[in-house]
Image (cartoon, grey):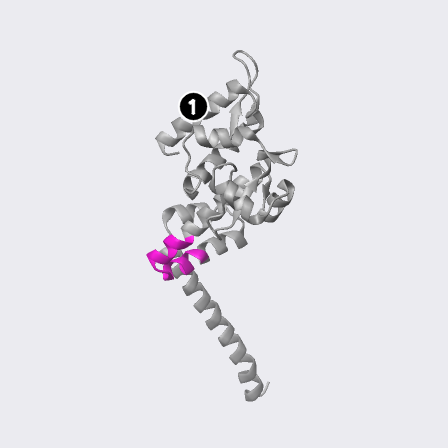
Amino acid sequence: MTTAAHNATHTPIARLEAAKAALRERFEEHLARASDAVVLKAVELADEKAFAALAKVGVDSKRSVATRNQEAMARMKARAFERVASRCELLDAKAAYEILGITKQALSQKTKAGKLLAYTNKGNRRKFYPAFQFAENKPRAVVASLIESLGVDPSDTEAMNFLVQHLVGKMDYSDPGEPSNEVSRFDVLDDSDALEIIKRDYANALSAGQ
């Protein structure tokens, strides 16, 4: 083998080994920045997921605390909306006012007057209307009565969201001694006894800040 050929072969190998060494060093840096909890969790994952989890630590560590807090808040808001959407059908404004046969402005007025429930996606501020509050192309009267009796301010986005979250939650609808029968609260709004329990549970959850 000529000297030129030898050098041509040797140079790529040297560069490859140097690249491997650099990657190992960068991985060690990620590993050093990771908390004990992250390392213990990562070791239980498949290789590609473990490496991704450790790599994310490095990315996060370069962001400021304020930025990471904002990202965490955005994720929390998205999860809250996803939970509600997974537990009931949410209609956009157009679907809601078409079902009721009214204008968009009239829908807004009914919402502001506490005649309808509206859930606000905190991520993009869009309002959605739980489908369970409509029957025979009209708002169910029990919804407006519930909003009023609980003293929920329709203009208070947080309060309205909290009420919707409560109504899409589960309650045990069985009599004492019977097997558990969990149902969504909004499914039993027309049952007067269940409605009183819903109101009581709402007041307890509100006072507990849950």
Quadrant of the image containing the C terminus:
top left
Residue at image location 39% in from the left, 54% down from the top:
70
Between 49 and 167, the residue placed more toward the observer is: 167
Vertical comparison of 52 with 116: above or below: below
In the image, the segment drawn in magenta is 56-71
Q: How many other residues sit within 10 Å of disc 1, few (<14), some (14-19) or many (≥20)?
A: few
Count of numbered labels shown in the rendering: 1
By secondary structure, the bulk of the magenta-drawn segment is best described as helix
Amino acid beneath label 1? Arg
Magenta run includes residue 63: yes
Q: Position of residue 118 (x, y in %)?
A: 51, 41
Report whether 74 appears left or right of 100.
Answer: left
Q: Position of residue 10 (x, y in %)?
A: 53, 79
Vertical comparison of 26 with 69: above or below: below
Q: Position of residue 56 (x, y in %)?
A: 45, 57
Residue at image location 61% in from the left, 35% down from the top:
138
Q: Which residue is mark 1?
A: 200
Between 69 and 144, the residue placed more toward the observer is: 144
Vertical comparison of 74 with 130: above or below: below
Observer able to see residue 157: yes
Q: Position of residue 53 (x, y in %)?
A: 47, 53
Residue at image location 50% in from the left, 32% down from the top:
144
Residue at image location 56% in from the left, 80% down from the top:
9
Vertical comparison of 150 with 122: above or below: above
Outermost residue toward the top in this view: 177
Quadrant of the image containing the N terminus:
bottom right
SS at circle 1: helix
Observer able to see residue 32: no
